[in-house]
Amino acid sequence: MIYTAENDEIKQEVRDVQAARDTFTLDIYDLLADTDYKNTIEKLADQLQSGMDLEKGLLMKLGLFRTMRGDYLLIAIHHMVIDGVSWRILLEDMEQVYNNLQKGEPAVLPPKTASFQEWTRKLAEYANGSEIRKELRYWENIEKTKIKEIPRDFNKTDSVFKESRTITVSLTKQLTDKLQRNTNAAYNTQINDILLCSLGMAVKEWAGLDKVLIGLEGHGRENILENISIERTIGWFTSLFPIVLDMEHSDDLPYCIKNTKEYLRRIPHKGIGYGIIKYLTAPAHKKDISFTIKPEIGFNYLGEISQKKRAVFQHADISSGTSVSLSNKKLNAIEINSFIMDGQLQLEFNYSTKEFKEETIKTLTESYINRLIDIIQHCGMKKIPEKTPFDYGDLDLSIGDLEQILSSGKEIEKIHSLTPMQSGMLYHALLDPFSQAYFEQLTFSLSGQLDIGRLNTAFNMLIEKYEILRTCFFHEGLSKFKQAVLRERKVKIEFEDISTFSEYQKKVRLKNVQFKDRGTRFDLTNDCLIRVTVLKTDEKEYKLLFSFHHIIMDGWCMSLIMNDIKTIYTSLKEGRETVLQHTEPYSTYLEWLDNQDKSAALEYWGDYLNEYEQQAGIPKFC
């Protein structure tokens, strides 16, 4: 890869193999007699890394140092062409090839995934497509957030790495083990949730800020492009985007953990879209987003840096030299890199000495470690795991609304917003609780010897299959209507034998049962929203009354349900295993609906109805 400036843009060009023979150098150093070889290696490593050349494409330098303690290999690659995930791939491949060659075997590598060039080309197409436009409002709101600056000991100014220092702090191995093994179980979190929550609380304690702006790094390998795999592709995929942590209630530790987790889960595609829109999307598609927000604190969690015990290439405890030019401009006033190595969480706080005193940053690091320990201890004492809105599948559910729903005591599997039609039906049900609108009642005639027990079992198996039949609706005390799928819901068939009645009495009784059933409204929050009544009218004749609320299904569903009931009942009666066709849960449709581009739909219908001026009238009977 070479990089050239062209029309105020940086172009990257992939050279073919023949033209790229000078892409790396390998220097061998004999330090067998050097007793101070560690310092010598550090100095030589500085020299090697300072010779990178983006324009000529010299982006990789290797140094092999032979010492009295063994050989050390420095692999220095420019960050423009490799990221943290790529390093893991590269070292795995090097290990494989080295072992093959050492055994005299052909070099065998895992199958290649898509090229970096193909990925960038498809990314450019994605940048101006409809999918990325769904993120515009989210990033526009982030850019409009009012953020206070962090306090400084000296004037705010730009700094270079030469004017910075690093303070490294770490957790004990015991606490790191608890962080990895126990902490996340309490609220179904990930380690990044915990680390960022601790950072937000520490900054709040240090700077008194309710809204903490962080520049967050991600691996950038999100699954946003169709028909392309980059699992084993080497390149720089890293994404960088702003997040705003709400620390207004930082004194409430459980809430703070849950709120941080929920905030991070709602970032579209884990933040990769921010850079795409900022740098690749055409100005006409950006909605004039300013992109002026500048995080003063940067954070990156690199994961666990582990290695195989018997690997040929092991991480050395020798400095690899200065990996960043001291003349490079710092991106953030405070930059935090964190990782786990040798069973310990380590955090490196790099800060500008032109803006902060050492004791100021030490105060911040101490607060960070203390808050992190508080979270580890709190989560370790929590005996019963607690779910948050994300775990129920609804990205539009607040923590307060979830607590209100769970206070019902119901065992809930999923929670979702309502469809527009469902919202309308619930609104009318609340407006007129005694209305029979959207109450559906069907009567079927059945012939044969009916086993009511097995029929009841069949209906309950049907409810188990279709989650919409286990759904209830919440409205009281909520900011938005919600529907919830219960873990279990049962229906009990009401049975009455009227076979001894006269024909006239049978008709009257059926009418009365139908009338009473219609008059018994469904409680959309507490009732099973289907009812089944069976009247035995003769020795082998029955009337089956099936009632349901229209909010859970439409007329199209009836044939599906009745076919399934027939299949299940017949299987139960004949003692066979019940085999039903797989069906997508209703929640899949709700998720699809949530992901539709509402702005595009609004624009379409706005244009479609733009010139419609005639007043619509309702026909009247004379």
Image (spheres, rainbow, N blue to C red):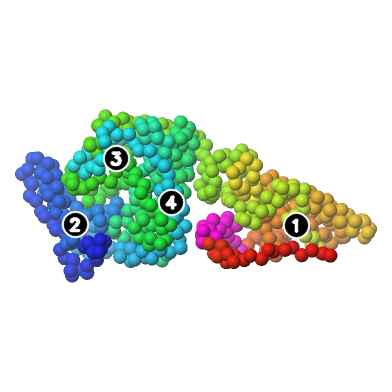
Q: Is residue 607 left or right of residue 122?
A: right
Write the residue at 32% across / 60% down: 232
Q: Is residue 344 above or below residue 268?
A: above
Q: Is residue 537 left or right of residue 107?
A: right
Q: Main secondary structure of the magenta part?
A: helix
- Give the distance between the C-alpha atoms of the residues marked 4 and 1, in whole angstroms: 45 Å
Segment tinted magenta in the rendering: 581-602
- Give the distance between the C-alpha atoms of the residues marked 2 and 4, in whole angstroms: 39 Å
Amino acid type, residue under disc 3 in the picture: Ile
Q: Nearer the viewer, mark 2 or mark 4?
A: 4
Cβ atoms under marks 4 and 1 closer than 8 Å: no
Of labels 1 and 2, earlier in sequence is 2
Q: Which mark is residue 60?
A: 2
Q: Nearer the viewer, mark 4 or mark 3?
A: 4
Amino acid type, residue under disc 1 in the picture: Glu
Q: Is residue 589 magenta?
A: yes
Amino acid type, residue under disc 4 in the picture: Glu
Q: Which mark is residue 103?
A: none
- Give the distance between the C-alpha atoms of the residues marked 2 and 3, in whole angstroms: 29 Å
- Give the distance between the C-alpha atoms of the residues marked 4 and 3, in whole angstroms: 25 Å
Of labels 2 and 3, earlier in sequence is 2
Q: Is residue 194 left or right of residue 418?
A: left
Q: Is residue 296 magenta?
A: no
- Give the distance between the C-alpha atoms of the residues marked 1 and 2, in whole angstroms: 72 Å
Q: Report the residue marked by disc 4.
A: 140
Q: Which mark is residue 334?
A: 3
- Give the distance between the C-alpha atoms of the residues marked 3 and 1, in whole angstroms: 63 Å
Residue 383, position in %: x, y? Answer: 50, 34
What element does badge 1 sit on? strand
